Structure formats: structure tokens, C-alpha cells
């Protein structure tokens, strides 16, 4: 079955960096775009970034543009999120989510989600 | 960027009730809208995509409608497992905006 498993979360000081990973199985990873979505404690969902199936296109939320980088290794069925210059407002559970198949151009919803990894930015 | 709003923010209902949640976009998104259900401590679960297409495995009591800027999610007969928070999301543009959520709780 389709599985996405996030890892790499933890406590980090403001201004420091962290890299999240999303390991996948149960589907042909290289055929799907993947999103990162986050949720601050007690708050709603916020889309963070998406990468196309082949890595050719990447899009970011304004709140993380220039600080976060999404990437993928199709040989390892793994997605990454490099987070630099972290701020307190980046504290959240970070989910990776597979892009669905019925899309508007290359813009797709998310059909399968991981269970999330918590990132806490605090001194 | 496209902004999404949802109403109501909280809805109190009983088992068996018909429940309707509204989602509005700040500009037309055609039919490129998804609905998700989320329970505390869990990842979101896709219910509806392309405004009205039911995701495989989702009970038929869930339905979606709308186009352009106004959309609705309807639960025809609320079940105990449906008490949760519901989010809409537009994917017409590469900003993938979520609505603020509607919490459905027990009356």
C-alpha cells in the first residue's frame, strides 16, 4: 500500500538549519509530484512546497521562499525539505503528501499523506 | 494569491443530521477544489477532488458541489466517525491555498 514516512524533525534554534526526509513505498515514486504541507500547533493547514515528478518544477509558499528548498532522489524514492534560517513561526508538524492524478495543468491536490514530523524552532 | 474562506468555523450537530460546509475562493478556481477531513493528531484524509469527485474508499454520504468561487461539502447523515475538522484547498494555481477549516462537533 502507499506509504509516506517523514523523518528529521526535532528542536532547532532560530537561524539554524534542518533537513526533513520523506521516504516512500507502495507506488512508483518517479511518476508523482510530492507536496510538503505544515500545521502549526492548534492551527490550520499551510501548503509549503511542491516538486514535480521529475524535479523539473518546484513551487514555494511566499512564507518560505528563499529559505526552504524541496528536492527529490528518485533512485531512493525519497523527498527532502532543506530548511534554512529557521524562525519561530516555522514551528509545525510537517507532512509530505503525494500529488493526485486529476490536476489543473501541473497543479494537483494531495491524495496520500504521511503522519508528519514535528519541527520546533526555539532557543 | 487566491484566498479561501470557510463557513461556519464551527458546526455543532447530532448523529443523523445533514451537514453542509461552504468554501469560497477570492477568484474563480473553476472546479479545482479538494476537501479533506482531519482528526486530532492525525494526517488529513482526502474526501473529494475536482469539486465533486469522491475519492475511492470514502463513504457515499460525503458529496461535494460547486464551481467558480463557491463550493459546498455535504454529509448526508452525520455518523459518529465524522466528528472532525474539514478543510477545503484550491489547486487552480501554484499557491495551493487551504481554507481555515470547519470543526464539526457534537451538539
Image (cartoon, coloured by chain):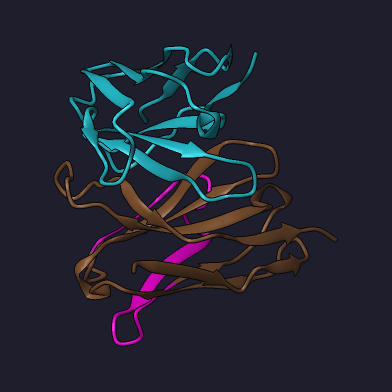
Any part of residue B25 in sight: no
Q: Nearer the viewer, residue A45 or B12?
A: B12
Letter of the chain in cyan: B
Q: Residue at x 19, y 27 (%)?
A: B31
Q: Position of residue B10 (x, y in %)?
A: 60, 17
Residue found at the far bottom of this picture = A75
Letter of the chain in brown: A
The region drawn magenta spans A57-79
Residue found at the far left of this picture = A105
Q: Residue at x 57, y 17 (%)?
A: B9
Q: Quadrant of the N terminus of chain A?
A: bottom left
Q: Residue at x 45, y 19 (%)?
A: B5
Q: Indicate left or right for B49 with B103 as reference.
A: left
Q: Residue at x 29, y 25 (%)?
A: B63
Above or below, B70 against A77 in this view is above
Q: Position of residue A87 (x, y in %)?
A: 69, 54
Amino acid at each position: 500500500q502507499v506509504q509516506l514516512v517523514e523523518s528529521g524533525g526535532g528542536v532547532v534554534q532560530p537561524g539554524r538549519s534542518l533537513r526533513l526526509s520523506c521516504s516512500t513505498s507502495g507506488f512508483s515514486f518517479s511518476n508523482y509530484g510530492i507536496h510538503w504541507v505544515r500545521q502549526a500547533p492548534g492551527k490550520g493547514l499551510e501548503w509549503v512546497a511542491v516538486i514535480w515528478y521529475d524535479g523539473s518544477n518546484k513551487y514555494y509558499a511566499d512564507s518560505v521562499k528563499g529559505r526552504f528548498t524541496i528536492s527529490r532522489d528518485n533512485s531512493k524514492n525519497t523527498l527532502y525539505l532543506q530548511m534554512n534560517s529557521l524562525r519561530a513561526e516555522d514551528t509545525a508538524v510537517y507532512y509530505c503528501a503525494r500529488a493526485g492524478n486529476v490536476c489543473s495543468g501541473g497543479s494537483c491536490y494531495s491524495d496520500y499523506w504521511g503522519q508528519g514530523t514535528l519541527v520546533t524552532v526555539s532557543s | 494569491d487566491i484566498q479561501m474562506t470557510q463557513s461556519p468555523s464551527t458546526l455543532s450537530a447530532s448523529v443523523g443530521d445533514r451537514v453542509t460546509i461552504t468554501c469560497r475562493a477570492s477568484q474563480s478556481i473553476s472546479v479545482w477544489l479538494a476537501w479533506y477531513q482531519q482528526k486530532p493528531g492525525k494526517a488529513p484524509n482526502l474526501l473529494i477532488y475536482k469539486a465533486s469527485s469522491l475519492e475511492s474508499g470514502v463513504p457515499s454520504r460525503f458529496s461535494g458541489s460547486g464551481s467558480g468561487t463557491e463550493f459546498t461539502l455535504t454529509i448526508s447523515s452525520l455518523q459518529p466517525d465524522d466528528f472532525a475538522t474539514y478543510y477545503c484547498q484550491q489547486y487552480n494555481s501554484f499557491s495551493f491555498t487551504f481554507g481555515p477549516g470547519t470543526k464539526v462537533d457534537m451538539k
